Each structure stands twice: as C-alpha cells, then as structure tokens.
C-alpha cells in the first residue's frame, strides 16, 4: 500500500517495498562510505546523492549508502539501550530524505520501538515536540545548510541534539558495526525484511495526524519562548496585544522558504494569528530554487520579493529565507532612505534579537544576573550591547550543542540567560528552546518594532529618546559598529591539509616571531598587546600552546588584540569545520576601521597558509 502526505500529497512510502532488498556492500565499500562521513554533535553528514555530486537533486541513494544509513539507525537504537522506546522521526525536504526516512522508520519499528513519523518537518518543530514526556528521543534526517546532494542525521532528546560526548558514544557503536561489515549488513537486511507489518503500517498511516499534533505543540512552545511563560493566559494576552499593535501600525513579512521543511510548518498560521500580514513564496517542500545556505547572493530572491511587496503595500518591511531544515534563517529589510531591500548581515540579526531579549528580561527583572552565551566568532558588538544592559557574555566553541550546554551550566550557577546562539551565522536560541529557530528571530523583531516599552529601554541605554515613530532600519543604525568578516566571504574559507594541532603550533610560532614588526603598523590603531583564547566544547581557556587545548586540537582559536588599557579592539579567529571540509577564518574590528580589518585578515590568512605549508615542506 502507498502512503501519501495529506498536506502536500507527497509520497511517503510503499509498505510492500523493502529499501534494503538490494545487494549487500563489501567490507571495503562500506568502509569507504564511512570514511566519507563527517561526524559531529552538529550532525552526521555526507553526499548521499547516488552520483556523488553534491549539487545533484536526485532522489536515488546507492545500495552502499542505504546500508550505511541502516547501520546508523541500528547504532542509535543500541545507544538507547532498551527496546520499546518511543521515538520521533522526521526529515528535511531534500530529495534523498524520503528513502532514508523509509529505512529509519522500518528498522526502528523492527527493532521494537514505537515510531511517530512526522515525515517532512522543520528541525525546531520535531525538537520542540521531543520535549513532550511521551517521547524518549528523536531521529532527524537532514544536512541542514549543506548542498542539496548531501544528507545526514541528528539525534537527540528533550528539545536538543546530543552533546559531543553522547555523539561520540553513538559513533563508537557505528564504527564497530562498520568494522564487522557483512555481519552487520546481514543483520539490518534481516530486520528490514522481517518488520512487523502492522506496526509499520500504523506508523505510516498516522504520519499526518502526528504532524498535526506536533504543529499544535510547536505553536504553543513558540508562544512560550516569546512570552517567557508556559501559561495559556499569557499566550493569549501576547496574541491580543500583538494584534492591537499591528492594527494600529501594520507589519508585513515575506517568507522565501526555498522549498524547505519550514514550508510544512506553522509559519503562516502563527504569524497570521499574531496579526502579521504574511506572504510566503516557494512554500512547497522540495521546491528548492537556489542554493540552500541563506546567506549572501542566496538572499537576493527574498530581497527582490520584499521590494515588490513593499511597493504594493508599505507595511511589508521584513523578509526572511531559511536553510533546508528550517532552523537557520536570515533577514532582509526595507531601508526607507534608499527605498531598497537590504540584506541584514548575520551578526546583526543576532544583535537585534539580543537587544529585544535583554530589554524584555530587564523589564521583568531590573536587577537580574543577566547574560548571554555565544560561540567564539560572534562579533564583539555583542559584548558592547551586553555592557549597556549590565549583562555578561560567555563563549563556547562553535556548535549549537556547545552553546546550549554552556547556557545550561551557567543557569545552574544562577545566571538568567534568555537568549543564546551563534551570532556568526545569525542563529538565535530563545530560552527554553534548545535549537535555533527563525520564528524566534521574527518574534523578537516584532516585539522590538511594536512594543514601545521594549524599544524605549534600548534607546534609554543609549542615552537617547525613542522617536514617536521608528523603523527597523533606524534600530539597525543603533547597533554598535563593527566590521566583521562575513561567513560567505571567499577570504573566510581555506582548504588546509595539515593536522590541526600541528597547524596551530606553527601558527603560534610564526605569530610570535612576526608580532614585533606588525605591532609597529598596528600602533596606528592603538593596538599594543594581544592574548589568546582557545575554545573546546563548553570550555574556554586563555593561553598559548597545547597546554590550553586537547587532542585532537580541533577547537576554536582566537587571538584578541588590545590597547594599552587592555580594551579589546579586534580579534582574529580560526577553526576547522566539523561538518564541511573547510577551515574557517574571521576577523572582527571595532568601529568603521575597514583598513584594519583588511590588514588583519591578510596577515591571518598568510599565517594559516604558511603554517599549513610548513607542515608539508
């Protein structure tokens, strides 16, 4: 029997089809497929398109990769340690996801678990639903912002992905299964062939009902994050206040969803309920019309759509576009002076969300012990904003699980942390959520734009009076000025061949050798000293050398440049990606000192390049 998604009439599965009824791979083939995977707390990813082309939109997955995916499912199940667990399964909207979802649901059912299959669903939605105490874990199939031919897996529970230690435990089980080769493949093939058909059919038939339930749960959870309260009365009050404010001063939002999983989520219904005029485009899952990562030129379509809607209706001043699993979204806005839509850089997206969240927290608790948690490459504009709210800043290594876990640690120490995230990619996580969510960003902007009390506190922190009317572009102008290397800048990426530990060791030697000469040039920008911060997981250590990092030496590395008073003027940051085969660089500079930014970035890249070359000379 064929099962179809009622929402978009998309094919889910045919229960008579066994996706593992194909030739088993050899041990060498399986090992090679394993070696091509990137495994981290942010997700397990590889190219699953059968052609091996990362831009191939095919639905076909090779028999080798089908078995690799099956062993990942088996690893996840064995980590859970007992049968009859209740598991949420979902996927983003990339083409290979449907077949991988079929494998996951079939095997988990055969392994004795109760599976609730949400099919195509946004990552924040399945993770919010996993908070419900009925569920023991979630298994989500996604490669997030990677190109369309990639796919991967995120595992977790209680609203967030597993931390690095737990991921390592699952990966160890996976490695052992791969090493056992034909025996493991035979096991998953038998499990798939012998699935309890009645239980499997029930999971497939209940997919639409389960997703509708998860949408309702997600809607309530989104309102909880916006209000800071689990009470329905608080949610209703927020809705009514929002509708009143938007009746007096309408707000229109354009969503360019690029065929993502957000197209199957609550964006239109929730924003409409709040009184927003909302127009969605490319809002059929799988309707991918441009590269997935929502940055740089990939936001041009959203920008042009917003301009078009604004010219017809001046209430439309915000647009957003998202990645394929719908947890990463960036913003475009109307600049009234130029009468054009502009792309808001990722660091400023987080800055605006931070201003909104800190202002709301200060209004509720003026004397609270307030802080935010961000990753290493988040711009120092965040520190400047927090200083105005008398709030602290804590930093972790890049990775959503790292900032979430550090925030939880700091809450146990008595800190109030209403917002956290990775400013370097624009993502913000509003407590109690444990994952990035574009809806949280949009609701933060809504409160900043339509709650005069929130905006007034920010202007008061700046020593200014709030104008009678104000626009988003006017608020953007109040963000402390910094020049920061964009993630999509060509100079922000390098391919390195060295072991990261050796590269950092040579980088440090070169930096110290060259510092006296560069200090002469840097003195014109009042830079006279430096210090180093190294970040691994939730730990930040200050100091140079391997004593301040641990094997395999893949954490974030930041050189902070200081003036005579010890004030931070700029930083140079680097880290090898754990989800893509690239080495990332960033420079952040206070003020409009573009020449300083370019000087530091050139030196930074040169140091990395020579450190990499030295390891192979």
Image (spheres, rainbow, N blue to C red):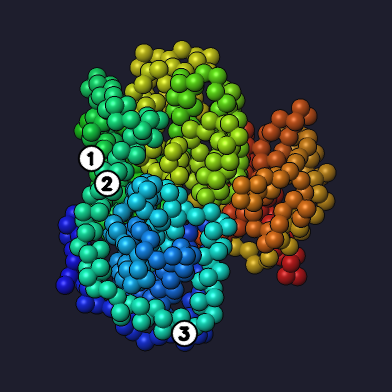
Considering only order in the chain, which callout, 2 or 3, is on the residue closer to the N terminus? Answer: 3
Q: Quadrant of the N terminus?
A: bottom left
Is disc 2 placed on a helix, strand or loop? helix
Tell me if residue 540 can be seen: yes
Q: Which is in the foreground here, disc 2 or disc 1?
A: 2
Q: Quadrant of residue 523?
A: top right
Q: Residue at x 75, y 41 (%)?
A: 531
Q: Nearer the viewer, residue 509 or 48?
A: 48
Tell me if residue 599 can be seen: no
Considering only order in the chain, which callout, 1 or 2, is on the residue closer to the N terminus? Answer: 2
Considering only order in the chain, which callout, 3 or 1, is on the residue closer to the N terminus? Answer: 3
Q: Residue at x 45, y 44 (%)?
A: 434
**In the rendered image of this protein, does residue 583 appear above or below residue 183?**
above
Is disc 3 placed on a helix, strand or loop? helix
User: What residue did someone put label 3 on?
Assistant: 183
Q: Quadrant of the C terminus?
A: bottom right
Q: Which mark is residue 215?
A: 2
Disc 3 residue crowd, few under 14, some 14–19, many 20+, Cα 10 Å: few
Q: Marks 3 and 1: in contact by CB < 8 Å?
A: no
x, y percentage for residue 515? 80, 45
**In the rendered image of this protein, does residue 172 appear above or below residue 372?**
below
């Amino acid at each position: 029997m064929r099962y179809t998604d009622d929402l978009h009439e998309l094919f889910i599965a045919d229960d008579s089809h066994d996706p593992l009824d194909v030739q088993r791979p050899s041990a060498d083939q399986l090992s090679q497929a394993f070696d091509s995977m990137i495994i981290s707390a942010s997700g397990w990813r590889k190219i699953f398109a059968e052609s091996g082309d990362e831009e191939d939109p095919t639905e076909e997955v090779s028999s080798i990769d089908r078995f690799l995916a099956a062993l990942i499912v088996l690893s996840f199940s064995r980590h859970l340690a007992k049968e009859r667990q209740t598991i949420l399964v979902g996927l983003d909207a990339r083409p290979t996801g449907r077949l991988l979802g079929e494998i996951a649901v079939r095997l988990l059912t055969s392994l004795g678990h109760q599976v609730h299959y949400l099919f195509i669903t946004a990552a924040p939605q399945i993770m919010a639903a996993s908070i419900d105490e009925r569920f023991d874990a979630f298994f989500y199939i996604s490669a997030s912002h990677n190109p369309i031919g990639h796919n991967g897996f995120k595992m977790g529970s209680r609203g967030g992905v597993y931390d690095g230690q737990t991921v390592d435990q699952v990966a160890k089980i996976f490695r052992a299964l791969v090493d056992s080769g034909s025996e493991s493949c035979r096991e998953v093939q038998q499990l798939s062939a012998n699935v309890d058909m009645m239980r499997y059919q029930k999971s497939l038939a209940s997919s639409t009902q389960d997703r509708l339930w998860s949408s309702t749960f997600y809607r309530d959870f989104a309102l909880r994050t916006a209000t800071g309260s689990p009470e329905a009365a608080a949610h209703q009050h927020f809705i009514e206040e929002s509708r009143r404010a938007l009746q007096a001063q309408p707000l229109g939002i354009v969503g360019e969803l690029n065929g993502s999983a957000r197209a199957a989520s609550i964006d239109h219904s929730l924003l409409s309920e709040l009184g927003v005029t909302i127009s969605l485009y490319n809002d059929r899952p799988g309707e991918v019309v441009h590269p997935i990562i929502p940055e740089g030129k990939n936001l041009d379509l959203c920008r042009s759509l917003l301009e078009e809607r604004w010219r017809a209706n001046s209430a439309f001043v915000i647009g957003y576009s998202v990645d394929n699993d719908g947890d990463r979204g960036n913003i475009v806005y109307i600049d009234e002076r130029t009468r054009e839509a502009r792309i808001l850089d990722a660091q400023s997206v987080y800055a605006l969300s931070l201003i909104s969240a800190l202002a709301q927290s200060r209004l509720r608790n003026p004397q609270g012990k307030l802080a935010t948690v961000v990753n290493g490459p988040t711009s120092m504009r965040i520190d400047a904003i927090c200083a105005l709210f008398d709030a602290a800043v804590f930093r972790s290594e890049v990775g959503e699980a790292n900032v979430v876990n550090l925030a939880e640690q700091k809450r146990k120490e008595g800190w109030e942390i209403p917002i956290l995230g990775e400013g370097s990619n624009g993502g913000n996580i509003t407590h109690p959520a444990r994952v990035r969510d574009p809806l949280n960003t949009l609701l933060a902007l809504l409160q900043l734009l339509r709650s005069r009390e929130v905006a007034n506190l920010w202007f008061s922190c700046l020593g200014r009076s709030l104008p009678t009317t104000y626009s988003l572009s006017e608020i953007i102008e109040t963000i402390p000025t910094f020049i920061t290397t964009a993630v999509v800048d060509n100079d922000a990426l390098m391919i390195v061949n060295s072991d990261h530990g050796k590269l950092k060791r040579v980088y440090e030697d070169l930096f110290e050798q060259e510092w006296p000469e560069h200090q002469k040039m840097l003195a014109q920008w009042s830079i006279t000293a430096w210090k180093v911060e190294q970040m691994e997981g939730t730990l930040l250590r200050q100091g140079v050398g391997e004593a301040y990092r641990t094997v395999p030496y893949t954490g974030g590395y930041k050189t902070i440049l200081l003036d005579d008073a010890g004030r931070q003027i700029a930083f140079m940051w680097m880290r090898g990606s754990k989800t893509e085969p690239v080495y990332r660089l960033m420079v952040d500079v206070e003020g409009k000192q573009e020449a300083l930014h370019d000087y530091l970035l050139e030196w930074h890249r040169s140091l990395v390049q020579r450190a990499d070359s030295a390891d192979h000379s």
